[in-house]
Image: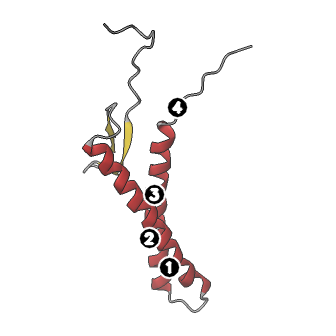
Amino acid sequence: MERPTGRTHVTPPPRLLPWPSPDGNPCYLVTDDDGSYLSRLADDLEAVQLATGADVLGHARKVLDDPASPYREVRFAGLRLAECLTDALRVAESRGMRLPVPDTEDP
């Protein structure tokens, strides 16, 4: 026979997924299974997005460090950096929403 632990099951908040809907709106996943297929897919995509951002930053630095870089290359680098920053901010927001809320006791 199982003993009650006195703990209540708390459903975690929805997870912001690393891709938008076809309309450009945020997509959320509601689950308490961090190992689900969709959770793992989102984790993998977040890792790819962050790695891509690091790669783009490396290439953009070369273009931006060269004062003779053509305007089109500088513009292309800026656009790719903006895309990567958008992805990184979404990852940060998603992960921040999943951080545990600390227990605070008022004195």
Label 3, secondary structure: give it. Answer: helix
Amino acid type, label 1: His
Please give the residue where the numbered disc 4 appears in the rendered image: 100
Labelled pair 2, 4 in contact (Cβ < 8 Å): no
- Mark closest to the chain's N terminus, 2 or 4: 2
Front position in the image: 1 or 77: 1
Label 2, secondary structure: give it. Answer: helix
Amino acid type, label 4: Pro
- Mark closest to the chain's N terminus, 3 or 1: 1
How many other residues sit within 10 Å of disc 2, few (<14), some (14-19) or many (≥20)? Answer: some
- Mark closest to the chain's N terminus, 4 or 1: 1
Please give the residue where the numbered disc 1 appears in the rendered image: 59
Labelled pair 4, 1 in contact (Cβ < 8 Å): no
- Mark closest to the chain's N terminus, 2 or 1: 1
Q: Which mark is residue 80?
A: 2
Residue 65 drawn above or below residue 107: below
**What is the CA distance from the residue labelled 3 to the residue labelled 2?**
10 Å
Q: Which mark is residue 86?
A: 3
**What is the CA distance from the residue labelled 2 to the residue labelled 4?**
33 Å
What scheme was used to colour the molecule?
A: secondary structure
Q: Quadrant of residue 9?
A: top left
Q: Residue 98's x, y, as percent?
A: 47, 36
- Mark closest to the chain's N terminus, 4 or 3: 3
Q: What residue is drawn where x is 34% and y is 30%?
A: 32
Residue 21 visible at all? yes
Labelled pair 2, 1 in contact (Cβ < 8 Å): yes
Labelled pair 4, 3 in contact (Cβ < 8 Å): no
